[in-house]
Image (cartoon, rainbow, N blue to C red):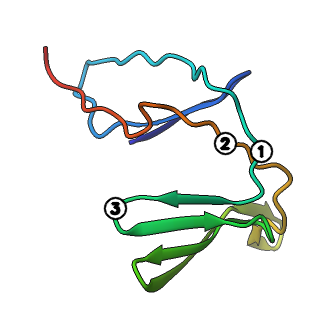
Amino acid sequence: MPVLFEGVQPTAVWLHQLPSGRTEKFQPPSADWTKPDRLDLKTEGVTWSCSRKDGNLFDRIRAGDLAVGRLVFAINKQTEIGERWTECDRIVSLQLQEQPDALGRELRDA
């Protein structure tokens, strides 16, 4: 389950599982923020790329040699005439923070 904590120092974590009734404490990130011109995140066989040329969160997603598509950030507006989805058309700021434990950790029963 993805979790995002907003505030002075936003934090995003991914929990593979959280048993009912359990809690988990997270420390705020301690590394410095950088402002890259582009971002390439690589996982097992998949590359997520952001070049900041438009409003796409990731403008190119590839699984090996296969182009999978893109990932956009869209907002749903409800008006008198109905619903309307609007995509972002630019990225104002891109910040990156490297963490040594960014691969995550499994929660295990004690």
What separation in Å lies between label 1 and label 3 (alpha carbons)?
Answer: 25 Å
Residue at far bottom of view: 66
Name which residue type carries label 1: Lys
The crowd level at tag 1 (other Cα within 10 Å; few <14, some 14-19, many 20+) is few
Graded by Cα atoms within 10 Å as few (under 14), some (14 to 19) or many (20 or more), the crowding at tag 2 reads few
Image quadrant assignment for residue 82 = bottom right
* Residue 35 position in % (x across, y down): 77, 44
Residue at mark 2: 96
Q: Amino acid at mark 2?
A: Leu
Looking at the image, residue 98 sits to the left or right of residue 81; the answer is: left
33 displayed left or right of 23: right
Q: Residue furthest left?
A: 110
Q: Position of residue 97 (x, y in %)?
A: 63, 36
Picture residue at 33% right of the left edge, 17% below the top: 23
Under circle 1, the secondary element is: loop
In primary-sequence order, the first of circles 1 and 2 is 1
Are dots 1 and 2 in contact, CB under 8 Å?
yes
Looking at the image, tell me whether mark 2 or mark 3 is earlier in sequence order. 3
- What amino acid does circle 3 point to? Glu
Q: Which residue is mark 1?
A: 35
x, y percent for residue 86: 77, 69
Please name whichever residue, 31 or 67, is drawn nearer the observer in this view of the structure: 31
Residue beneath disc 3: 44
Q: Residue at x 60, y 20 (%)?
A: 30
- On the picture, is 25 further left or further right than 82? left
- Mark 3: secondary structure: loop
- Which of the 4 image quarters holds residue 58? bottom right
Q: Position of residue 14 (x, y in %)?
A: 41, 39
